[in-house]
Image (cartoon, grey):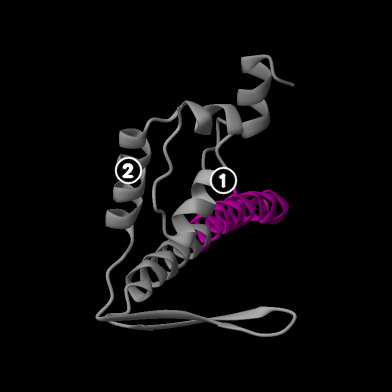
Amino acid sequence: MVQRVYEEPEFSEVLERVPLEIRRSLTFEQRSAITAALRESRRKHAIDIRFVIPLIFTQLYFVLFVGKDLRRETQEKMVDRRQEAGRWVIAWVLGIGALVALIVFLVCGYILKSKAGIDLMPDSHASDLLRQAGIR
């Protein structure tokens, strides 16, 4: 036999999402414990006023909360994470860009040195070293 528990509307909505066969198997104590846990997990506000105004074809639900803005902390954490991710992306892009620029600079310097006929090591050339290594 299933006993009914007085539940606040938002808690009964949560329980309605539980499959019917599971809901039917809940005892009075289990339903009471679930309702109590849901009530305790709800954030507390200095002022929490809720009321319904019934109209002819519908009803209006009004809510007034007054209390410390707890959302700001969550929003600040999200903004901080986005900013940190942005800084990491910028650092990686700059690092890879600097590496590519260094390689281009060295290759261009070598080509210019070769075209100008400057021989820094008279007995050794890069083409000779590549041939010895079996690369070319």
At a point 35% along the width and 36% down the height, the residue shown is 28
Q: Would you name the residue on which mark 1 appears?
A: 16
Is 32 in front, or is 19?
Answer: 32
Asked whether, in this view, residue 13 is left or right of residue 69, the answer is: right
Asked whether, in this view, residue 24 is left or right of residue 116, the answer is: left
At a point 72% along the width and 53% down the height, the residue shown is 115
Q: Secondary structure at mark 1?
A: helix
Q: Quadrant of the C terminus?
A: top right
Bounds of the magenta segment: 90-119
Q: Residues within 10 Å of mark 2 (few under 14, many from 20)?
A: some
Q: Quadrant of the N terminus?
A: top left
- What residue occupies the far front of the structure in this picture? 1
Q: Would you name the residue on which mark 2 appears?
A: 32
Asked whether, in this view, residue 135 is left or right of residue 91, the answer is: right
Is 6 in front, or is 13?
Answer: 6
Question: Where does residue 122 sit, x and y in percent of width and height?
Answer: 55, 37
Question: Where does residue 108 sit, x and y in percent of width and height?
Answer: 67, 55
Amino acid, disc 2 = Ser
Dividing the picture into quadrants, the one containing residue 83 is bottom left
